Amino acid sequence: MYQKYLLSFAFVAFSGMAAGAYACEGVNEYPDWPSKDWEGGVPNHAKAGDQLVYQGSLYQANWYTNSVPGSDYSWTLVASCDGTPSSSSSSSSSSSSSSSSSSSSSSSSSSSSSTSSSSSTSSSGGGNTTVTIQENSTGFCGVDGTVDSNNSGYTGSGFANTENASGNGIYWAVSGDAGAYTLSWRYANGSSANRSGLVNSNGSNVSTGDFTGTGSWTTWASSSVSVDLEAGYKDLSLIANQASGLGNVDSLQITGPNVAAVQCGGSTSSSSSSSTTSSTSSSSSSSTSSSSSSSSSSSSSSSSSSSSSSGAGTELVIQESAPGFCGLDGTIDSNNSGFTGSGFANTDNASNTRVEWGVNSTYGGNYLLEWRYANGSSNNRSGSLEINGSDAGTVDFSGTGSWSSWTTVSANIPLRAGENTIRLVSTSGEGLANIDSLNVVGNEVQPGSCEVSSSSSSSSSSSSSSSSSSSSSGMSSTKDCNSITNQPILTVASDGSGQFRTVKSAMESLSTSNSTLTQIRIKPGTYNEKITFDRPKVTLCGEPGKAAQTIITHEESGTSTGFTIKITSDDVSAENITIRNTQSTSQAPALMITGDRIQFRNSQIMGFQDTLYVRDGTSYFRDTLITGRVDYIFGHGTAVFENCEVRTVMAGSAVAAPATPSSRKWGIVFLGGKLTATSNIKNGSQWLARSWGAEGFTAYIGVELGAHIKGEGWGTMSKNEGKLDQARFYEYKSTGPGANPGARASEVAPQLSDAQAAEYTVDNIFGSWDPSFAE
């Protein structure tokens, strides 16, 4: 499976075969764009397959783009116009550290590190081309584990480190013609065992890769296989076929006929379709919004959402009042010529007015968002961009000269798989510019719902009431922690570029009686620390979209003593970080909580047994990944998990193990989200929960359940501990292959009615505490 949470944006630099100057003859030279966005309009972009010459080189667009050729992965470098080979390189430092568990396969020459940034590079010679795919770049689709940088000698920004179990893998995406391919992995294996893996293309095993020991985790070698592959898009995977997982894989180099790294999740069969938008015009005049704030919802009209598929991406154009257009604070007008569709979105002239869209993406990853707009004022009418309730930066809408002169502005933004809410919010009293359309380019995108639930799973109307404390869009309206400027800020960076090198030292610089809300901003890196977090009113703040690269890690066993982080203070928040415990053979919490009003968002809590110990207090988790194998969410406290993924990574008896005392009304509650499992987990092998205490409380409200969940649903710790007939176990309208209400023991674990499920709200559960991440 793809581990989409590890995907992050990286520029792609291609190096192509030299070509004679004739290859560039007759080709437009940047910025002389070859394509128009509407008939009669000014050329202002390139479409998939269009070529441009820039700085003496020939580039081809992978999809709709208006970026500078070669500046991002929307372009492929085809050739040098002067007949000389072109090449590209970029740099990044490699960091050294002690070895950790991982895997990879094969034999052959050892190599020392070279420095380069995480990228996909390609070259060609003869009939074949060669592409090298680094971690977290185009063509890298994920790992059942982590991307680490704690062992020296790697190239790029790190290496893929799978979990130590059979069935865990690494995933890539390429395209190319049919023929013979050579796949070569650069890897390290500090163990003495061959950490072999099955090589799979589009669901079929085609070979086996051997990754024999290299002597240490900082000694790198290469392993290769030769395979025949079909033409077109290829999902490539390397899946461990023994219990140690794979070796640490630094990169994959592929040589084959016209091979290229592509975005993940493409179609294995080629198809294309196109659609066009009509243009209408009316008299032009200076436009100022004057209507009162109101929300326009989507309805059918002459405006439409159109999409076209070509090559590496799908292009979705969302017009006003069409599917995917969710509303604005203002009006839809048509008094200025040059717009497409039936008009344009004109916000009220005030700050915090917004335009909103819904987009459904089949795959998580980076997408190009492009707005067509007009701004007849002399001021930049910038907007704050929010993706699923989190701050994603600022979009500048500078003046275009008149209200009938249109141009585009774009941004590369990560979207999650499934429903996404895209919102522009004005930052000045003038409101936003007039927005004609939003164009989204990426893999398999279509208009999304304008009533997005906070849960990514299917749920009934009553399950939406279970998250009634959320905003009307279903997404958290609380801005990302990095956008907060009215609090003291401490910076942490493992490379020494911050005020502190460790999270613990930054925390200890504060008083144990701290009364001022304070940010500890953590730069991406791996922080080997064990922390008893006893300072209140603190936010641990990673960079947006960098949770998988911002890792606080420790390895130690012991239910109450072997934690990575133990939060004993109150009012602690965390966002965009990973906390993990790599001890895999016994009880080893990554996170232990005894404080009140603890909240996490867009983060990862990773471990095996007893991953998350909600020992006491109150805690709230949103849009967060929790991994483990047995009893990995457990304890006496009250904890709510809203729209979270809870992933089983090794065989184990139960997901949750509540020990809720009878004096507590609420225990461990899941609102939406999903329970998933890696491919090595057998179907029907795990309980939803088993009671650690006699009256342990666990409820699943509108949760998508994977096939690994047992039909009976619930279990006990032992004959004398946590008897099932005393436990407080509840379920309401679960979905997915693990949903089997008919097999549950209803007399001890009832299915809730609509009225009963409506009581499961964040407000009801926490009472006077209103978690800001739930707003």
Image (cartoon, grey):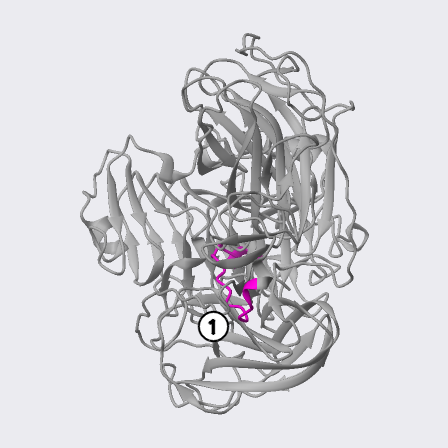
Q: Position of residue 157 (x, y in %)?
A: 40, 65
> In this orientation, which residue lies closer to the viewer: 201 or 690?
201
Could one spot residue 613 in this view of the protein? no
Q: Residue at x 24, y 36 (%)?
A: 488
Q: Is residue 146 magenta?
A: no
The quadrant holding residue 560 is bottom left
Q: Quadrant of the N terminus?
A: bottom right
Q: Residue at x 64, y 86 (%)?
A: 226
> In this orientation, which residue lies closer to the viewer: 364 or 486?
364
Q: Position of residue 566 (x, y in %)?
A: 34, 54
Horizontal side of 543 relative to 389 (left or right) equals left
Q: Residue furthest right?
A: 742
Q: Is residue 20 magenta?
A: yes
Could one spot residue 689 in this view of the protein? yes
Q: Amino acid at mark 1?
A: Ser
Residue underneath mark 1: 584
Q: Residue at x 45, y 55 (%)?
A: 55
* 411 over 737 or under it: above or below: above
Horizontal side of 209 relative to 515 (left or right) equals right
The part of the chain drawn in magenta is 4-21
Q: Position of residue 200 (x, y in %)?
A: 68, 76
- Magenta stretch prevailing secondary structure: loop
